[in-house]
Image (tube, helix red, strand yellow):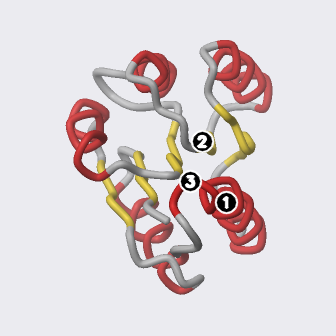
């Protein structure tokens, strides 16, 4: 399973990349810039997007709208340091765009929650790609 991480906080990206790798998922592309992450989509072809909502230049909502327009069929996890109302609204908007949202969480994401999300995303992508991690 390929995972694209998008967060403008380099420390958060490193932490998530390390946790994901330790859970047995080595195929991770981490990016701090939404426009750069959009450019990586066609070649990296992620099964799961883990996306921060608060980003400079192009925020997470605009990023997800663009991803939906490009026909992304994988799973999405939303992260934010903002209050839960913002997370709920973002989840509703992303779902309305046709994206499959596995959850919306406050930062930092606990390792156990991350493991459950990765398993759910893996189960969802397995029929499409075989049983690869």
Image coordinates of residue 66 in percent, x first then y, are 39, 19
Image coordinates of residue 54 in percent, x first then y, are 48, 31
Of residue 42 and residue 22, the one placed in the foreground of this image is: 42
Residue 79: quarter of image? top right
Q: Tell me the mark number nearer the camera, choosing from 3 and 1.
A: 3
Q: Earlier in the sequence, mark 3 or mark 1?
A: 1
Distance between the Cα atoms at labels 1 and 2?
14 Å
Q: Residues within 10 Å of mark 2 (few under 14, many from 20)?
A: many
Image coordinates of residue 59 in percent, x first then y, are 42, 23
Distance between the Cα atoms at labels 3 and 1?
27 Å
Tell me which residue sits at (74%, 43%) in the image.
103
From where the camera sits, is residue 133 visible?
yes
From where the camera sits, is residue 79 visible?
no
Residue 10: quarter of image? bottom left
Task: Name the side, left or right, on which 113 lies relative to 130.
Answer: right
Q: Tell me the mark number nearer the camera, choosing from 2 and 3.
A: 3
Distance between the Cα atoms at labels 2 and 3?
16 Å
Q: Tell me the mark number nearer the camera, choosing from 1 and 2.
A: 2
Q: Look at mark 3 in the image and give the residue it sits on.
A: 128
Q: Secondary structure at mark 1?
A: loop
Q: Residues within 10 Å of mark 1 (few under 14, many from 20)?
A: some
Q: Tell me whether the residue at label 2 lies in contact with that at label 3, contact meaning CB atoms closer than 8 angstroms.
A: no
Q: Residues within 10 Å of mark 3 (few under 14, many from 20)?
A: few
Q: Look at mark 2 in the image and give the residue it sits on.
A: 76
Q: Look at mark 1 in the image and give the residue it sits on.
A: 109
Task: Name the side, left or right, on which 22 lies relative to 104.
Answer: left
Image coordinates of residue 107 in percent, x first then y, are 64, 51
Q: Secondary structure at mark 2?
A: strand
Tell me which residue sits at (70%, 46%) in the image.
106
Q: Earlier in the sequence, mark 2 or mark 3?
A: 2
């Amino acid at each position: 399973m390929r995972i694209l991480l998008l967060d403008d906080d380099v420390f958060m990206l490193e932490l998530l990349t390390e946790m994901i790798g330790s859970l047995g998922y080595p195929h991770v592309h981490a990016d701090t810039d939404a426009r750069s992450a959009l450019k990586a989509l066609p070649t990296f072809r992620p099964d799961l997007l883990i996306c921060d909502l608060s980003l400079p230049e192009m925020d997470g909502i605009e990023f997800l709208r663009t991803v939906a327009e490009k026909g992304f069929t994988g799973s999405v996890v939303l992260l934010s340091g903002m209050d839960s109302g913002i997370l709920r609204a973002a989840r509703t908007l992303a779902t309305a765009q046709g994206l499959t949202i596995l959850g919306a969480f406050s930062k930092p994401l606990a390792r156990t929650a991350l493991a459950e999300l990765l398993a759910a995303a893996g189960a969802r992508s397995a029929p499409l790609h075989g049983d690869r991690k």
